[in-house]
Image: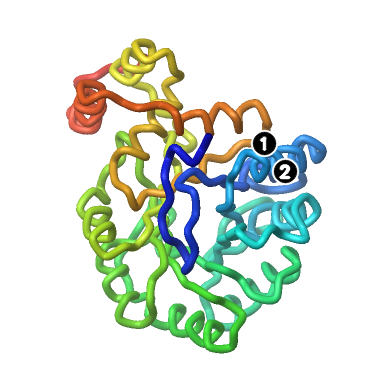
Amino acid sequence: MIENAGTFSLGGRTVKRLGYGAMQLAGPGAFGPSRDKASALATLREALAAGVNHIDTSDYYGPQVVNQLIREALAPYPEDLLIVTKVGARRGTAGEWFPACQPDELVQAVEGNLRNLGLDALDVVNFRVMFSPQGPAQGSIAAPLEALAELQRRGLVRHIGLSNVTAEQVWEGREIVEIACVQNHYNLVHRVDDPLIDVLAKDGIAYVPFFPLGGFNPLQSATLTRVATDLGATPLQVALAWLLQRSPNILLIPGTSSVAHLHENLAIAALDLPDDAVAALDGISSVQSSGMEHDT
C-alpha cells in the first residue's frame, strides 16, 4: 500500500517516502520509559510488516529507550531497512534539552547510538543544531561537521544530514561534507523552508519535515477540516498527504506508539488531493499568518 507514495534516495539507498518516526515510543516529551512497551514493540514490527523501510530515531529519545526498543523489536535488521539517527543534543536529569556539539560529545553520541541499536556503522546521522531553543539560528556549524566527517572517514558513519538548520548552514555544510538530507520544522502552516525544499529537490537531496502535524500545537484550521470532510479523511491525514504532494524529495516520518494510528498514517499513500483541495490548503499559511482564519 505505501508503495503508492513513491520512493526517493536517502543515504545511498532507495526508501519509501512514507517512513516512521520513533520518538513517541519513549515517555512524555520523549523522556523516560515507554508507557506501553508491548505496544511500542508491536508498532515497530507492524511498521516493517506494512512496508516501511525508513525509521528515524535518536539515542537522546529516552535517552536510550527508543534505540533499545528498536533493537529488541527488529534486530537482526532487514537488509533494506535504513535507520536514521541524530546527534547534537543531550538530556538533563529532568528531561531538559541541552546542546552537545563538541567533538568528544559527538563521538560519545555516535558510539551510544551504535551500541544501543546494535550496529557497526550508522547509515545516516543528522547533526541537530541547538544554537537556539526557538528554532534555527545563524552560526557556523563547521567544527561539529568536521568532527562527524572524521567519524565518517573512520567508517562509523556512512552518511551525514542536518537538522534544525538555516539555508545558510546547509550551504556551509555542503562545502564540508556531502549532505544526505535536511530535517527541519515544516508543515502546512510553517513554510519558511519553501525555497530551500525546491533547491534541495533539484539537487536530489531529501527533505524530512518534523512536526508535520504541528508538533506541540496540532494544526487546527477551518479550511483543513473542510477539505478533510470532503475527502472522507481526517485533518491530520490531509496535512500529511499535502506534504507528500508538495515535493518529490519530501520524506515523511509521522510517529505514533499505536498500531491503529500507524495504519491511519500509512493510509495516506492512497489519498490523492485534487487540485482545488491543494489550492485551498496552500492558502492556509498566508491566511493564518494574517490572523484572518479562526481555529476550530
Q: Position of residue 189 (x, y in %)?
A: 30, 35
Figure check: 161 above or below 245: below
The vertical placement of 274 against 178, above or below, is above
Describe residue 246's horizontal placement relative to residue 254 as left or right.
left
Check disc 2: other Cα within 10 Å, few if <14, some if 14-19, many if 20+. some
Residue at image coords 37%, 15%: 231
- Name the residue carrying label 1: 257
Secondary element type, mark 1: loop
- Residue type indicated by callout 2: Arg
Inspect the image, locate mark 1, and give the three-letter code of the amino acid beneath it. Ser
The residue mark sitting in front, 1 or 2, is: 2
Colour scheme of the picture: rainbow
Which x, y percent locates residue 255? 57, 40
Q: Which quarter of the figure has residue 106?
A: bottom right
The residue indicated by pointer 2 is: 45
Q: Residue 17 — which label?
A: none
Q: CA distance from mark 1 to mark 2?
A: 11 Å
